[in-house]
Image (cartoon, rainbow, N blue to C red):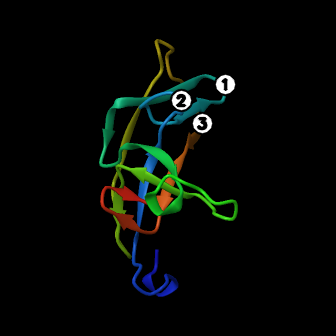
């Protein structure tokens, strides 16, 4: 992110791995050319964490007007400052299937935020 492209008072951003809707595990997998999927091994993630995404209305009041667009927030979040980089490590679990060398596809769902309020990015 370049700070010159961001609105004043906002530099950098926030990022996290999106959690499965039904739990705490990160959404993501690697699929090899034979269609075998290996899911993210959540015990072997470094630097970044799976985060819960929450919709909030009414500036925290919990009430929504018909015209209001929900605020999407998530926690925990990893801060990325302009011109900053982070090395993130994810391991994948093959569930007993022997991984094969060759081309594969990586699919991860990331949450991106531009602002941080106590405890949550939005």
Percent x, y for residue 8?
44, 87
**In the current view of this chain or complex, which residue is farthest to the top?**
96
Eyeballing the image, is 114 above or below 90? below
Please tell me which residue lies in front, 47 or 65: 65
Distance from the alpha carbon under mark 3 to that under mark 2: 9 Å
Judging from the image, what secondary structure is the residue with disc 1 in? loop
Q: Where is residue 69 in the image (x, y as percent from the top left)?
A: 63, 62
- Asked whether residue 122 is in view, the answer is no
Please indicate whether residue 59 sits to the left or right of residue 49 in the image.
right
Foreground disc of the pair 2, 1: 1
Image: 29 above or below 89 = above
Q: Mark 2 points at which residue?
A: 101
Q: Where is residue 27 in the image (x, y as percent from the top left)?
A: 52, 36
The residue to which callout 3 is attached is 104
Q: Residue at x 39, y 39 (%)?
A: 90
Which residue appears at 66% of the width and 24% of the height?
A: 35
The quadrant where residue 30 appears: top right
> Earlier along the polypeptide chain: callout 2 or callout 1?
1
Q: Nearer the viewer, residue 23 or 102?
A: 23
Find numbered disc 3 in the image and state the secondary structure of the residue it sits on: strand
Residue position marked by numbered label 1 in the rendering? 35
């Amino acid at each position: 992110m370049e700070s010159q492209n961001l609105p004043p008072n906002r530099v950098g951003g926030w990022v996290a791995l999106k959690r499965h809707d039904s739990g705490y595990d990160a959404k993501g997998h690697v699929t090899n050319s034979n269609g075998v999927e290996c899911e993210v091994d959540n015990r072997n993630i470094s630097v970044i964490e799976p985060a819960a995404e929450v919709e909030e209305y009414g500036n925290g009041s919990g009430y929504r007007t018909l015209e209001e667009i929900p605020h999407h927030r998530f926690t925990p979040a990893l801060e990325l400052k302009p011109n900053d980089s982070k090395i993130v490590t994810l391991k994948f679990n093959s569930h007993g299937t022997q991984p094969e060398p060759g081309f594969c596809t990586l699919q991860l769902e990331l949450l991106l935020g531009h602002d941080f309020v106590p405890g949550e990015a939005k």
